[in-house]
Image (cartoon, helix red, strand yellow):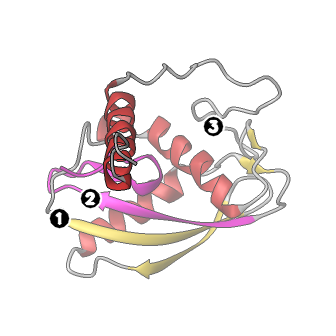
Amino acid sequence: MPDTPPRRYWLLALLSAAAAAVVSACKTAPQALSTQPISGASTVVGPIAGSKGSARSSAATSARAYREDGATHLYGLNVERIYKGKMPPLLYAVGVLNVEIDRTGRVTHLDWLRAPRHAPEVMAEIERTVNDASPFPAPTRLGKVVYTDTWLWHKSGQFQLDTLTEGQS
């Protein structure tokens, strides 16, 4: 084999080409995602209060799916209280709350999984915020639902829910 390069050079050339392809792919801008709703998909838009339950309904088929409907509902009612942008690394309080919703969207029970006991005023404010947001979207496919969300509380009194958070810096 007089003019044939050794096997290790071929391997090195192959690895270099693969690395170049990966780097090239990283430089390619991602395609924009469509903001149009998928036909047939139910979207929950803003809260609508009603005297006998929510005027809206949720098509969620699990508590995890309902969590986004609940978070969207809370954000719609508390626009001025939502922390804009990424939360700072140190938060005043973090709480994990179970919310039980009946078939009409009414809050029937709240249960703290992780209560911010160092900030009882935050616990009371979160409970008041959830109760005042009742009725939630009615969980029509579930009958009733217990969903869990994490409240990220800033010292200013503004908050984000883990479901819709913009992250932390």
Residue plotted at (80% across, 58% down): 103
Q: Magenta residues?
A: 145-169
* Residue contact between numbered discs 3 and 1, judged by CB atoms under 8 Å: no
Label 3's element?
A: loop
Give the mark, 3 or 1, whose residue is nearer the N terminus: 3
**The disc labelled 1 sits on which kind of residue?**
Tyr
Q: Disc 2 marks which residue?
A: 153
Is the residue 87 above or below the residue 39 in the image?
below
Q: Disc 1 marks which residue?
A: 92
* Residue contact between numbered discs 3 and 2, judged by CB atoms under 8 Å: no
* Residue contact between numbered discs 1 and 2, judged by CB atoms under 8 Å: yes
- Of the pair 28 and 153, the residue shown nearer to us: 28
Numbered circle sitting on residue 107: none
Magenta run includes residue 77: no
Q: Is residue 123 left or right of residue 30?
A: left
Is the residue 71 above or below the residue 39 in the image?
below
